[in-house]
Image (spheres, helix red, strand yellow):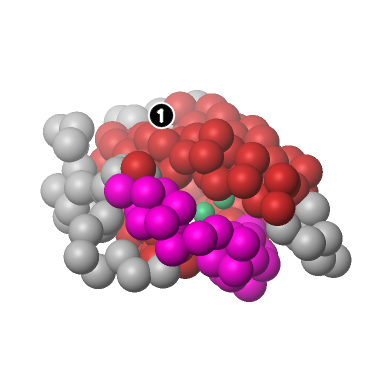
Amino acid sequence: MRSAQVHDLADLNNIHHQLEELFHQHQVAVLKFDCAGAKTFLDSFEEGMSIHMKEENEILLPLYRERAVQIRGGDCAVFIGEHEKIVEWLGRLKLRLSRIPLTDPRPQDILALLDDEAHFKKFIEHHTLRENRILYPELERVVTPKEKAGLIRLLTFSLGDPDNPPSDI
Ligand SMILES: [Fe+2]
Ligand SMILES: [Fe+2]
C-alpha cells in the first residue's frame, strides 16, 4: 500500500493486515510440515514488520512523543518496548523453527512451535489495537494537514503480494 488509498495516518497501519496474512501463510506451511516454506514466509513477515517498526520508531513515535497528550497505556516507551519484544519473539520463533529437521519434522515440535506462536499472535494483536486506538488517532490530531501529507509521502514502505513472497520456496 501507500498510494491513493491512504487518506488518514491510520491507513498506514493497515499494513498489519498484510503482515497477519503472511504470518497465516507461514503457519499453514508449518501445518503442512513444509519447513522451508514456513521459513520463507516467516522471513518475509520479519522483514516487513521490521521496516514498518523502523518507520514508526524513527518518524512517527518521535513526533508522538513531542506532541501527544499523555493517554493511559499510550506512553511512547510502551510502543518502543513492544517493538523490542516483537524483535525478541521473532528471534525465538526463528530459532525454534530452525531446530526442526527439514526432512523429518516431529509432530510434537510442530505443536510446540504453534503453541508459542499463539502467544506471539496475541501479543501482536494487542500491539496493533493499541496503535489503532491511541497512536494513530492521536498523531492524526496533532499534525497539520501539510505535515500529514508530507508524512504520507515520506512513509513509502509497501509490502509485496503475500501470495508471491520475494524469496523462493
Ligand atoms: Fe504499526
Ligand atoms: Fe508498531
Residue 127 in the image: x percent, y percent? Answer: 63, 59
Q: Is residue 139 magenta?
A: yes
Vertical placement of residue 37 versus 103, above or below: below
Residue 32 visible to an observer of this rendering: no
Vertical placement of residue 43 versus 149, above or below: above
Count of number-bearing discs: 1
Nearer to me, 126 or 146? 146
In the displayed structure, does residue 159 sit left or right of residue 134? left
Q: How many residues crowd around disc 1 within 10 Å: few (fewer than 14), some, or many (20 or more)?
A: few
Residue 10 visible to an observer of this rendering: yes
Vertical placement of residue 115 versus 157, above or below: below
* Whether the residue under disc 1 has CB within 8 Å of ligand 2: no
Residue 8 in the image: x percent, y percent? Answer: 41, 69
Residue position marked by numbered label 1 in the rendering? 101
Residue 12 in the image: x percent, y percent? Answer: 40, 59
For the residue labelled by badge 1, is the local secondary structure a helix, a strand or a loop? loop
Q: Is residue 160 magenta?
A: no
In the displayed structure, does residue 82 sit left or right of residue 118? right
Q: Residue at x 30, y 31 (%)?
A: 103
Image quadrant occupied by the N terminus: bottom left
Nearer to me, 71 or 148? 148
- Residue 45: which quarter of the image? top left
Q: Residue at x 49, y 47 (%)?
A: 110
In the displayed structure, does residue 42 sit left or right of residue 97? left
Residue 168 in the image: x percent, y percent? Answer: 15, 33
Range drawn in magenta: 127-153
